[in-house]
Amino acid sequence: MTQDVRKIKTERDLQNAFLQLLTTKGFRHLTVADICQASLTSRSTFYAHYLDKYDLLDQLVAHYTAVFASRVDLRFDQMITGKIDALVQGLLADMAENRAAIQILFTVHEPEADLQANFKMLLLKKWQAFITARQPETAAPVALIAAMGTNVQMTLIEWVIAHGEAAIDGVADAVNTIREAVLLQIDTD
């Protein structure tokens, strides 16, 4: 079933206006009227697509979380196996067309819609499962090691989002050094 082109364009216009306004007003100060004015749509049109500004935020966060979730296994495996150059290039490719939107949404921290927290939780679960499967004999708590691994990956993701391709020289070496230090904590050999 194909979607009406007008509906797609209207949703795109509302989403783009919403994201742009987030950079200037912030979520808490943003109103539906602001979104309608910036997108040149009526309130009734807005409400035909979204329940309120929270619904619009929820849908955007859910969309980008799903995109990230579809790639998290591959990107996690690249981190674990030390394929950091491939990881950085993959993140750049994954986020190429959505980098600005993700960067903006990373600044919004609502209890039910927090993209940055969603990314972090997906990675934390991967790290916890990975560490538990290895059954390390370490004095360090699994939760601490998982949090350290998660933070390394989140820092890399945030760096790639903020800087893009312009500043990736040396990033792989730095990330690899930290990755090795985290993995040393769970090395069972």
Image (cartoon, helix red, strand yellow):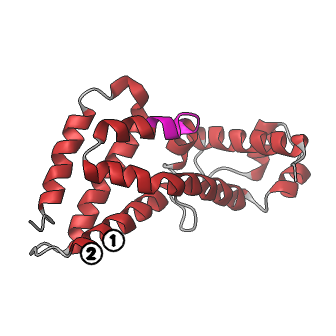
Quadrant of residue 91 within the rendered picture: top left
The boundaries of the magenta stretch are 92-99
Q: Residue at x 58, y 57 (%)?
A: 66
- Given the image, on which type of amino acid does mark 2 rest? Thr
Q: Secondary structure at mark 1?
A: helix
Magenta stretch, main secondary structure, is helix
Q: In the rendered structure, does residue 112 fall within the stretch colored magenta?
A: no
Quadrant of residue 129 within the rendered picture: bottom left
x, y percent for residue 148: 24, 60
- Given the image, on which type of amino acid does mark 1 rest? Ala
Q: Residue at x 21, y 66 (%)?
A: 145
Dots 2, 1 in contact, CB < 8 A: yes
Q: Residue at x 43, y 39 (%)?
A: 90
In the image, 79 versus 175, the foreground residue is: 79
Check the picture and name the quadrant holding the N terminus: bottom right
In the image, 49 versus 22, the foreground residue is: 49
Identify the residue position indicated by label 2 in the image: 132
